[in-house]
Image: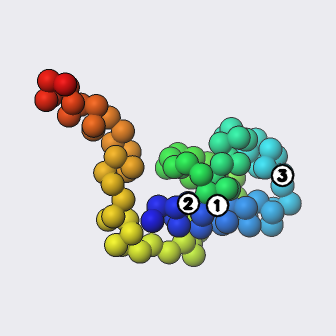
Amino acid sequence: MAEHLRVQLGEQLRRLREQAGLSQEGFASQANIDRAAYGKLERGQGNVTLITLARIAVAHEMSLAGLLSGITLNPADIQAIPRIARGNRHASRFSKKENGK
């Protein structure tokens, strides 16, 4: 599901970085992002923020649309992602408090 998107993005990021002839460390520095975090993105791990995507796009001198071009979405896969995985990390914690647990 979401893994497919992360893997596609990671492959896109690696391809663009290698085309630019930069190391992960060099590119992360140019994009003003943490090298370890950037490495995770290239490996398809973790969720990326819009700000990080924007920094990567600017460093590559391209639009966000250009950065994401070629990444395919399957609407059914996206709809199947549990809500807690969509960034609502505190939903279960708050529901427990509301229920007196």
Q: Is residue 25 above or below residue 95?
A: below
Q: In this view, does 77 lie above or below 85?
A: below
Tell me if I can see residue 61 in this picture. Answer: no
Numbered tag placed on residue 43 in the rendering: none
Query: What residue does disc 1 label?
Result: 10
Q: Which residue is drawn at 55% across and 60% down?
A: 6
Q: Nearer the viewer, mark 2 or mark 3?
A: 2
Q: Is residue 64 above or below residue 32?
A: below
Q: Which of marks 2 and 3 is nearer the N terminus?
A: 2
Disc 2 element: helix
Mark count: 3
Q: Residue at x 20, y 34 (%)?
A: 95
Query: What residue does disc 3 label?
Result: 23
Q: Please state which amino acid type lies under the numbered disc 3.
A: Ser
Q: Please state which amino acid type lies under the numbered disc 2.
A: Arg
Asked if disc 2 and disc 1 are in contact, CB closer than 8 Å, the reply is: yes
Q: Distance between the residues labelled 2 and 1?
A: 6 Å
Q: Please state which amino acid type lies under the numbered disc 1.
A: Gly
Q: Which residue appears farthest toward the left when viewing the image?
A: 99
Pick the residue in front: 78 or 96: 96
Numbered tag placed on residue 6 in the rendering: 2
Q: Which of marks 1 and 3 is nearer the N terminus?
A: 1
User: Residue 93: horizontal and vertical position, in percent?
Assistant: 28, 31
Asked if disc 1 and disc 3 are in contact, CB closer than 8 Å, the reply is: no
Q: Residue at x 34, y 46 (%)?
A: 84
Q: How far apart are marks 1 and 3 (CA)?
A: 15 Å
